[in-house]
Image (cartoon, rainbow, N blue to C red):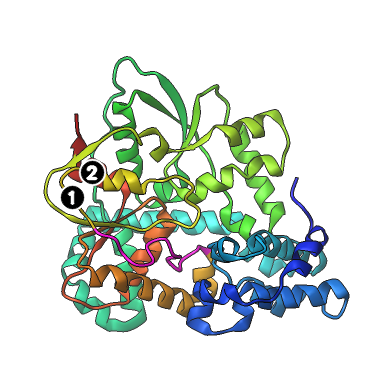
């Protein structure tokens, strides 16, 4: 089960305040704010543990000043998992702070789902009317209209169909069955990735079974809103009603969160779902692909990606793989962080994307819808004649490659 905030007292005290986290924290690099890094937050939390401070809206604001990229954990000489501590602290905030009904409504899943439905309708209208193609043609002109122009270009990059082909039938002699956890992006905004995943895995003899899953709950988990997170766990567990070999995800974030379910509910069904959760890329790691044409390709490794999809990309025959600086650093989006800290998020994304532009990359391949948002956000922040295109791994493989014998 999840540890409470007070259970992390030893880890918080263990922080030596060495400041090494400053060199890897994407938020600190942009803001130079000491409260953006782990040691600054630990100073605040240490004061709370000693009784000198109390949880307040300001404390919550500083705790939210984090993308959850875990770079500080990987670089910490004491191996402190700062993100888990911040999540536990935010949960403590929700337990001890009287939250207004308005704020509860803003944090409700009903509002979030309604927002996704509205985005989905807007995306559908842009595609069927062809407006998304017009926006693409006049993209550089639209970017000159400042913030609103950049947001329009960002949204258009996500709704434009790159691979809208119908699913292929499952090949004969299938060997595995899997429930497909499609995630919010596939379900509401653009199902290109879902179609591509279904296409490619069908060639591998994997039959994907659809179930009406809800959001994985990552934003509520990272916000410490365990009450809402547990509600989503219960809904998704009820939808998991068949015996399968895998629970497949094409999103690195969804994959990491589904594996967390068993830490909140130690039931047979919950443990089974968590244990069977597998990244789709793990099922194609032994397949070789050949590109239809020569392309300069680079990768962005999501912070929550525990699978090595990079070797899959490197082994694509016919491409020119480009090593790009900071390919494994945070894209700056991170869901709710990008809403609460828009300027910081956009600057992190902009700095990130410049590395790819400098290397004259054609495509940036990743495995996370949120990272596609971050990369496209960075692309919208720059105005150059030639830009790379951010694309999901499976869409790239289905559109530009074929299996190589």
Please tell me whether the stretch drawn in magenta is mainly helix, strand or loop: loop
The stretch of residues the image draws in magenta is: 322-335
Q: Position of residue 32 (x, y in %)?
A: 54, 85
Looking at the rendering, in which quadrant would you find the C terminus? top left
In this view, the residue farthest toward the right is 51
Mark 2, secondary structure of its residue: loop
Q: Residues within 10 Å of mark 1 (few under 14, many from 20)?
A: some
In this view, the residue farthest toward the front is 77
Instruction: Decide whether residue 330 is among the magenta residues.
Output: yes
- Residue toward you, 69 or 115: 69
Q: Is residue 294 left or right of residue 179?
A: left
Disc 1 target residue: 319
Q: Is residue 195 left or right of residue 220?
A: left
In this view, the residue farthest toward the left is 293
Residue 354's quadrant in the figure? bottom left
- Residue toward you, 335 or 7: 7
Residue 15's quadrant in the figure? bottom right
Q: Position of residue 39 (x, y in %)?
A: 67, 75
Instruction: Decide whether residue 223 is among the magenta residues.
Output: no
Q: Check whether the beta carbons of the residues at disc 1 and disc 2 lie within 8 A of each other.
A: yes
Q: Is residue 192 left or right of residue 46?
A: left
Per the model, the C-alpha gap separating discs 1 and 2 is 6 Å
Q: Position of residue 240 (x, y in %)?
A: 57, 31
Q: Is residue 40 visible?
A: yes
Residue at left offset 52%, top offset 83%: 31
Find residue 14 and name its label: none
Mark 1, secondary structure of its residue: loop
Residue at left offset 65%, top offset 33%: 271
Q: Is residue 54 visible?
A: no
Disc 2 target residue: 316
Residue at left offset 26%, top offset 29%: 168
Residue at left offset 59%, top offset 39%: 236
């Amino acid at each position: 089960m999840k540890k409470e905030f007070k259970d992390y007292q030893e880890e918080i005290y263990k922080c030596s305040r060495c400041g090494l986290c400053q060199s890897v924290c994407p938020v600190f690099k942009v803001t130079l704010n000491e409260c953006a890094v782990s040691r600054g937050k630990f100073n605040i939390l240490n004061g709370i543990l000693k009784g000198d401070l109390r949880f307040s809206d300001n404390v919550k604001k500083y705790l939210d000043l984090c993308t959850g990229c875990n770079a500080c954990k990987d670089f910490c000489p004491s191996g402190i998992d700062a993100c888990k501590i911040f999540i536990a602290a935010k949960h403590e905030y929700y337990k001890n702070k009287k939250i207004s009904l308005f704020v509860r409504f803003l944090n409700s899943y009903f509002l979030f789902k309604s927002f996704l439905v509205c985005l989905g309708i807007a995306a559908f209208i842009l595609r069927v009317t062809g407006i998304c193609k017009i926006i693409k043609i006049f993209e550089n002109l639209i970017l000159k209209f400042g913030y609103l122009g950049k947001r329009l270009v960002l949204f258009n990059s996500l709704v434009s169909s790159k691979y809208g082909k119908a699913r292929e039938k499952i090949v004969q002699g299938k060997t595995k069955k899997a429930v497909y956890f499609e995630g919010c992006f596939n379900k509401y905004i653009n199902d290109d990735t879902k179609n591509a995943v279904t296409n490619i895995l069908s060639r591998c003899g994997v039959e994907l079974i659809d179930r009406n899953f809800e959001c994985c709950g990552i934003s509520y988990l990272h916000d410490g809103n365990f009450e809402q997170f547990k509600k989503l766990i219960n809904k998704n567990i009820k939808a998991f009603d068949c015996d399968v070999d895998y629970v497949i995800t094409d999103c690195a974030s969804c994959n990491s969160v589904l594996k967390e379910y068993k830490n909140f509910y130690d039931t047979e069904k919950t443990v089974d779902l968590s244990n069977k959760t597998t990244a789709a890329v793990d099922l194609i790691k032994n397949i070789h692909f050949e590109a239809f044409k020569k392309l300069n390709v680079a990768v962005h490794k999501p912070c929550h990606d525990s699978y090595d999809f990079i070797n899959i990309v490197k082994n694509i025959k016919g491409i020119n793989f480009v090593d790009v600086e900071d390919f494994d650093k945070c894209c700056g989006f991170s869901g709710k962080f990008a809403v609460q800290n828009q300027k910081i998020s956009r600057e992190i994304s902009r700095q990130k994307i410049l590395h790819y532009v400098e290397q004259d990359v054609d495509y940036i391949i990743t495995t996370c819808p949120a990272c596609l948002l971050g990369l496209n956000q960075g692309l919208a922040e720059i105005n150059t004649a030639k830009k790379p295109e951010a694309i999901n791994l499976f869409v790239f493989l289905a559109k530009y490659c074929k299996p190589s014998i």
